[in-house]
Amino acid sequence: MTKAVEPSHATASEAVAPTHAAPKPIELSPSSTHEVTPTHVAHDAPKAVTPAHAAPEVQSPAQHAPSDQGEASAREARREALRAAPTVMVSACLLGEACRYDGRSQRSERVLAALEGKAVIPICPEAAAGMGIPRPPVDLAGGTGVDVWAGRARALTRETREDRTAAFQDGAQQALEAARRFDVTVALLKEKSPSCGSQRVYETGVLRPGEGITTALLRADGRTVVSDEDL
């Protein structure tokens, strides 16, 4: 059975997650890895949260693409950070929570195996911001997550072009607050998501190199973000 754990430095009633209640860190062990049920993701909007500290300034990455050797080295560094981390923030959809925009999950056995023995903080920034499940798909427009924080890009619904930038930023700030509250240094997030993508995101329907809105904020605060495709 999955064993719930509460970090001694965190106050459960104050923690931030895709629900109104605290994100319940769950400890994964070899015997429970394939039975993990993450914290339930609410379908209604939680109360807006202001980070305990000011949001970090998100800066643009180097413009040149890394070499194949450099990327391989960077990927291994991310994997090593994940292996060493006792507590990891994880996209709830990767744990089997049906919180994607289409109401489905992206449960990953590779992710569950990589989290054995660790405390896990499930997070869905978009559900946390009250965007609903299911919800209209959203693409970035005008740049990536870094550009959104700089005011150069927006998050727009794919079909109606409704601006959801503020909601995506709210969800990202809630993820950052949870990372700070639980002293999380590593996040394992879903690739290609406008929130959680860390290597590739959709910009106006085209998959391009870049990172999502939540990933950009977490990285600006010094957190390591690992892609599910790194495993």
Image (spheres, helix red, strand yellow):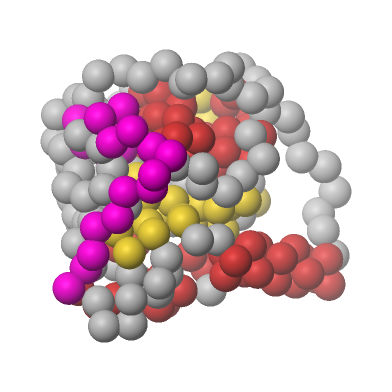
**Could you tell me which residue is drawn at 33 percent across and 43 percent down?**
124
Q: Is residue 113 left or right of residue 226?
A: left
Quadrant of the image occupied by residue 53: top right
Residue 63, placed above or below residue 74: above
Say whether residue 2 is magenta.
yes
x, y (%) of residue 230?
57, 69
x, y (%) of residue 148?
57, 26
x, y (%) of residue 132?
19, 34
**Could you tell me which residue is drawn at 51 percent across and 43 percent down?**
183
**Could you tell me which residue is drawn at 40 percent across and 23 percent down?**
170
x, y (%) of residue 45?
20, 25
Residue 159, placed above or below residue 87: above
Quadrant of the image occupied by residue 46: top left
Q: Quadrant of the N terminus?
A: bottom left
Magenta stretch, main secondary structure, is loop
Camera sees residue 201: no
Q: Is residue 95 left or right of residue 178?
A: left
- Residue range corresponding to the magenta coloring: 1-20
**Could you tell me which residue is drawn at 33 percent across and 70 percent down?**
28
Q: Residue furthest bottom?
A: 31
Say whether residue 64 is magenta.
no
Q: Which residue lies furthest to the front in this view?
A: 8
